[in-house]
Image (spheres, grey):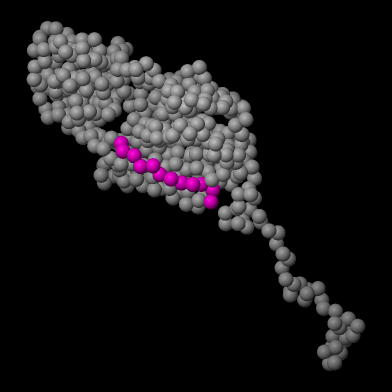
Amino acid sequence: MRSCALIAATLGCAQAFVLPQTFLDAFQLPSTPEIDRESFWPHKPYFLKHQVDPQSFPDDIELSELNSTAWDLYQIAGTSNKSYGNPTRVIGSAGHWNTINYILRQFDDMRDYYEVSTQTLKALNGKVLHYDLNYTTGGKVPTSQAFSLSPPVKPFIGKLVEIPNLGCSDADFEALDISKGSIALIERGECPFGKKSDLAGKHGFKAAVIYDNDPKSTKGVSGSLEKPTKHTVSTIGVSFAVGQELILGITLDPEFSLYFGMDSFVKEIKTKNIIVDTKHGDPENIVALGAHSDSVAAGPGINDDGSGTISLLTVAKHLSNYKINNKVRFAFWSAEEEGLVGSNYYVKHLSEEENLKIRLFMDYDMMASPNFQYQIYNASNSVNPRGSEELKNLYIDYYTEHGHNYTLIPFDGRSDYVGFIENGIPGGGIAAGAEGINTDNGKVLDKCYHELCDDVSNLNWDAFLTNTQLIAYSVAHFADSLKDFPERETNATQIFTSAEGQPKYAYKGGALIA
């Protein structure tokens, strides 16, 4: 009891066994913390997630994410330096294969929400290493440009022969007296460049020169021969004015000749599309959107179309935090720059049943052009699958409500919507501009389009954020409800193309084809 006596001496014995509060506090267990339900699950079960809200979902997108992924893609493009001499993500390159692997890895932590698959396909890859189109008296023929996917031909001097009409039928060639090693001079128009080149080769010409049919053109016409055949010959394009000079040369001298040569290659390679489906949502009502994963050989393609790829990856990541009512399909197309090969292959291999499940397709190509305009594809239900116009109006409403001006641009065949529209699937999309002129300031929209300088410094971050948020809105809007969107036509085989022999679009991807 000595301790009691000691304590009692100061506190009184009655208080001797009442411990001070500070003593109690020292041994008190910490209070049970409130459970953070957001971080309790490594992957929150689907049933605990909130329904996606189209109005608030765009706010989840942050600029820092777009910036970080843009730098990742640029570093990936650099893995092609050894083989190509510059950073690129062209199909077949290390940069493109690493892009495909990078996209796949982004979904590794979202396998509870997404089902990921790849689709292997073949595509043509080619490059013109060097070409010559010279006068025999010396000097290069002005404005000359080689057509992509041209086969090679050793340098030769050939007589130039003007082809009557437009060189689009056998009849245009059959009456000609063609000497061995001649060069066909053909006017642009009516049919694709590739058909003109094929017919020239079929009827014995060794090469072809195509001149523009637009008197206002100052540059040589250039584009793609698309799918070379055994008859396709090396082909070079020139301007309208130069074409007229060459015709005059033939008129003055029936033996008028040119020096022609081309070092090039065309090869078939394998590549892959990536298709990513949500595991939830109505599988009979699929909301599809896409961007292409490849670039041209000349550069890394961070705007074209790294920006679209980045936007889709960012939106897909944030969508995985929400419930949805309709299935969403994210597609990363390969070989867009080679003529929309990946997207066309995908659509052509859909069964009619699978085709009809896709309620709409949204194309997102070039979201961050440096001198951008907010561009919307000018879709009309009268000439496009029903629903395309409603998609256009959604974009118009969003830009208007957020105080942005917009401009309508035509469907011209330059991106991956083509295969969907031609197979009865409503389509649309937005862009920020390519090599065209900004009508607000008279300057080029993207000065680095298809160039080496299409790197991270080529991105306009305001446009990038706004357009990615619009993509997020479009996905959330349709993933939540398709109530007011037109039902699909029951006949999925209805093809929205022009008359036989007449290409509906002048372009196929980034390449002019007719």
The residues colored magenta run 112-123
Can residue 138 be spotted in the picture? no
- Please provide percent x and percent y for residue 334: 37, 38
Rendered view: 235 above or below 170: below
- Name the residue at 51% across, 50% down: 110
Depth order, front residue of 20/266: 266
- Which quarter of the rendering shows the N terminus? bottom right
Is residue 116 found inside the magenta-colored segment of the image? yes
- Tell me the chief SS of the magenta region: strand
User: Toward which corner of the image does residue 125 lie, by quadrant?
Assistant: top left
Rendered view: 372 above or below 283: above
- Name the residue at 51% across, 19% down: 380
Is residue 144 found inside the magenta-colored segment of the image? no
Q: Is residue 377 left or right of residue 512?
A: right
User: Toward which corner of the image does residue 55 lie, by quadrant?
Assistant: top right
User: Toward which corner of the image does residue 26 lie, by quadrant?
Assistant: bottom right
Residue furthest toward the bottom?
2
Depth order, front residue of 78/187: 187
- Please provide percent x and percent y for residue 351: 44, 34
